Image (tube, grey):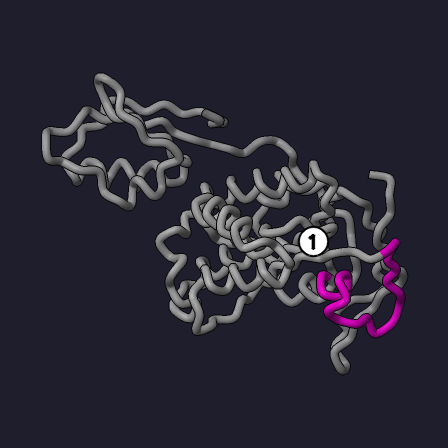
Amino acid sequence: MDEKIISLSNVAKSFGRNQVLDDINLTIHKGQSIALVGNNGSGKSTLLKIICGLANATSGKVTYSGKLKFNYVPEHFPKMGITAKQYLMHMGLIEGIAADRINEKLQELLQTFFMEHMADTQMKNLSKGSLQKVAVIQALLSRPDVLLLDEPLSGQDLQSQRRFIHLVKELILQEVTVIMSCHEMLLVNQLSDVAYEIKSQKLEPFAIDKTPKWDWDILYFEKPVEGTSIHPGITGRAHKLDYTEDDIRIVVSREDSNKIILQMIQDGFNLRAMKGIDEWEN
């Protein structure tokens, strides 16, 4: 991680009389993962845009080691009158990816983010959370030199965030540089080598906690009487669901446990046991 690819020297940005950034100095290395935190309106999104050239600094200088390919996930994604799959196919073709490879990659990513059933929905009819997933999938279609993420999967379910973390970690291992503006401390702690907070227009070091935070429960329910089915909302939330000889085993994030237990009991299932674990990899 010694190769410097981007340098910001005394960068400042103003919008009229409103100064957002002042005297920002930052060196970015190949394969580094950087998180930017701070209050809404502090300048995180603006700094991301300056880094990739989508916005110009009012003063100061941004220097690149060479020609870099940026993939960018904006915080707000436009609603359009085409389907999610049509949009993603067009973006893949623009990137120069072969159509069969795009289809293969899309199938994998849509499944990863539980979007298969929304692939043929027009984007203007998708929720903000689903549009966020489309934006993330777009950025993961091809391998960039620098991946810029502006509030990726903010407020999404833990399972989607966990899969997203796994995919981004794979890119970091391939020496993709990741720069992320984020409020979600789980993403910041799990993905970042270093973090900075934008306070009073300046960039200040921010402490991150690398301790794993995956808290899971394994729920054991008695096998149901014939004809009783599991609510589709539970299968969507479960990290793993399988049937043993004696019971049904459901692995869920701890924050979802109470809701799932309540739903299962309402549907006629009996809870046999519950076991807490810190991390689930199987």
Position of residue 217 relative to residue 77, above or below, is: above
Residue assigned mark 1 = 36
Residue 213 rendering spot, x and y as whole percentages: 54, 34
Please, which residue is most extreme toward the top here? Answer: 245
Res. 56 image quadrant: bottom right
Who is closer to the viewer here, 248 or 115? 115
The kind of residue tagged 1 is Leu
Left/right of residue 205 with respect to residue 62 in the rendered view = left
Who is closer to the viewer here, 5 or 196? 5
Q: Residue at x 74, y 56 (%)?
A: 69
Location of the N terminus by quadrant is top right
Residue 8 rendering spot, x and y as whole percentages: 85, 59
Who is closer to the viewer here, 83 or 73? 83
Position of residue 111 relative to residue 24, above or below, is: above
Left/right of residue 22 with respect to residue 266 in the rendered view = right
Magenta region includes residue 49: yes
Res. 253 image quadrant: top left
Left/right of residue 232 with respect to residue 170 in the rendered view = left
Residue 276 rendering spot, x and y as whole percentages: 40, 25
Category of crowding for the residue at label 1, using alpha-carbon neighbours closer than 10 angstroms: few (below 14), some (14–19), many (at least 20): many
Position of residue 268 relative to residue 200, above or below, is: above
The magenta region covers 48-66
Q: Residue at x 62, y 63 (%)?
A: 94
Q: Residue at x 72, y 65 (%)?
A: 49
Location of the C terminus by quadrant is top left
Residue 167 rendering spot, x and y as whole percentages: 58, 41
Residue 186 seen in this snapshot = no
